[in-house]
Image (cartoon, coloured by chain):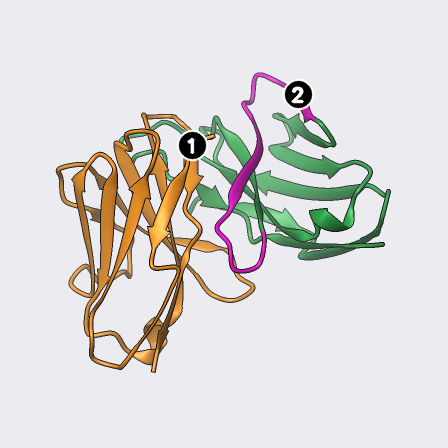
Amino acid sequence: GAVVSQHPSWVICKSGTSVKIECRSLDFQATTMFWYRQFPKQSLMLMATSNEGSKATYEQGVEKDKFLINHASLTLSTLTVTSAHPEDSSFYICSARGSAGGTQYFGPGTRLTVL
Amino acid sequence: QQQVKQSPQSLIVQKGGISIINCAYENTAFDYFPWYQQFPGKGPALLIAIRPDVSEKKEGRFTISFNKSAKQFSLHIMDSQPGDSATYFCAATYSSAAGNKLTFGGGTRVLVKP
């Protein structure tokens, strides 16, 4: 099956700093990547959808200036949490899809803890 | 708002038993219904998926039953094993300009007791 990786798998940072999370599709070209946030014992919440080479589409209530998404190539998307605060602590998961209507494959997630 | 309602929230089953998870959706435009399995601290993994032109799909011990008229679908895990203990999410999506966003159910935590 298709493989999606995320780096780092966990990160601890101080309040006010920025953190970048990478999402890579290892064996296929991802025309679309999605970023999710998951709180403990809850479902996945879609934050934004990004297509390669274009601006991300953010879900209602997600601050685009706080969660910067870049999808510069068909195998890489990045999520940067700017000026992170403790309430941004969460499990961030990306997914990638090769074609419209295709299956979404999820990365292993990144645990962000903001002190 | 598009919703997918999932039940139960949690489930305990004995080893060898059948785990049944149900989902109901509202949007009749949905045309793809995947199930994901998630272990603690890991990302979801696609388990099995179905399209509405099929009423049942089986892959190993996992079966999806789909009732289009009732707008419901369910996951059956036969001969449940302790290794099946995980959280299961149903989801739904449809082809649209919005990019085939998945709408997830709330999840079901399954515990299989040995």
Look at 56% across and 64% down and name the residue there. A41
Figure quadrant of the C terminus of chain A: bottom left
Residue A73 in the image, given as x and y percentages of width and height? 17, 37
Residue A80 in the image, given as x and y percentages of width and height? 22, 61
Q: Nearer the viewer, residue A62 or A70?
A: A70
Residue A10 in the image, given as x and y percentages of width and height? 39, 65
User: Could you tell me how far apart the alpha carbons at marks 1 and 2 are, in whole angstroms?
Assistant: 26 Å
Look at 64% across and 34% down and name the residue there. B73
Helix, strand or loop for disc 1: loop
Q: Residue beneath label 2, please?
A: B55
Whether B96 is among the magenta residues is no
- Specify the colour of chain A: orange
Residue A1 in the image, given as x and y percentages of width and height? 47, 30
The subunit carrying tag 1 is: A
In front: mark 1 or mark 2?
A: 1
- Label 2 environment density (alpha carbons within 10 Å; few <14, some 14–19, many ≥20): few
**Chain whose colour in the figure is green:** B
Q: Residue beneath label 1, please?
A: A2
Q: Is residue A103 above or below residue B45?
A: above
Direction top: furthest residue: B53
As shown in the figure, which amino acid type bears the numbered disc 2?
Ser
The answer to whether marks 1 and 2 sit on the same chain is no
Q: Which residues are magenta?
A: B39-59
Q: Is residue B57 above or below residue A4?
A: above
**From the viewer's perspective, is A97 left or right of B19?**
left
The subunit carrying tag 2 is: B
As shown in the figure, which amino acid type bears the numbered disc 1?
Ala
Q: Is residue A37 above or below residue A1?
A: below
Look at 36% across and 34% down and name the residue there. B100
**From the viewer's perspective, is A89 left or right of B79?**
left
**From the viewer's perspective, is A10 left or right of B56?**
left
